[in-house]
Amino acid sequence: MKMKGFIAIILVLTLSLIACENDSHQQLEAQKIAQKNEAVFKNISKMWQFNFPNPRPEVAGTLNQWNEWRQFEIELSQKPKSTLSAFKMKTKNVSSKADTLVITAPFEYKKPQILSRLTTLNTKIKSLETFMNLEVIPEQKIAKLIPEINEEIRGLYNQWDEIIIKKAIPKEIGEELMLQALDTTRNARPSQMKEKMEISNHIKKVGFE
């Protein structure tokens, strides 16, 4: 009986020792993960710099009415200040808002080159979300991706400015009538075409006298 009791005590002590070692190992691993996440958080925080140019007044007026773009800009500009998990959640929210940009773009921005850049921007935001939610975050890829996202944003503002600049260029006298005549060449009767051309030529002639 004494021997059985002694063996039982040894068994309990052994199991307790193993349990303590397991707990210590788990605590050590948890500390390593926490330290690593903290280092990644600091690095990502330094990289997280997104720039939105100051738009022309005409562009600003359009963007102020484009709610989806304003929400996207606000969400992307706000930098998480707490944990790596906050960055993961941030990228999911930004990605969700980026999904709406192409389909909600104002009429004057529904041009192929602008819609193409909005699509590219959305693709890069999706990549950012994917990288941030991997088990091992590829910091170098994120460091390369963030400037690319800024480049797409800057490109959009340049294209929006270009629209305003083109609108501001004065047309030659009679040019609009000439363009209308060219646009309707296939459907217009010869007499109508002749009349429009005569009106255009008369306006140009008056303008140069």
Image (cartoon, rainbow, N blue to C red):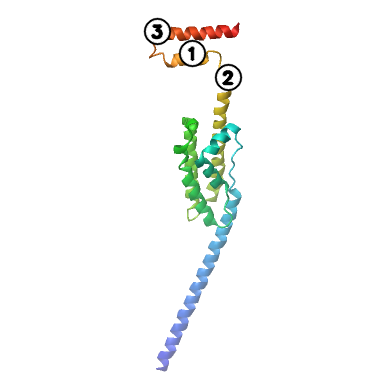
Question: In screen coordinates, is 177 left or right of 45?
Answer: left
Sort mark 1 into few (<14), some (14-19) or many (20+) by Cα contacts within 10 Å: some
| Amino acid type for the residue under numbered disc 1 | Met
Asked whether the viewer can see residue 56, the reply is no
Give the residue type that dot 2 points to. Answer: Pro
| Above or below: residue 55 compared with residue 141 | above
Q: On screen, 174 above or below 105?
A: above
Label 3 belongs to which residue? 190
- Residue drawn at x 46%, y 46% is 96
Contact check, label 3 and label 1, Cβ < 8 Å: no
Q: Residue at point 52% right, 72% down?
A: 24
Residue 121, position in %: x, y? Answer: 50, 40
Residue type, label 3: Pro
In space, the residues marked 2 and 1 are separated at their CA atoms by 15 Å
Residue nearer the viewer, 207 or 130:
207
Q: Residue under circle 2?
A: 170
- Check disc 2: other Cα within 10 Å, few if <14, some if 14-19, many if 20+: few
Near-viewer residue (165 or 38): 165
The answer to which of marks 2 and 1 sits earlier in the sequence is 2
Residue labelled with disc 1: 178
Q: Quadrant of residue 51?
A: top right
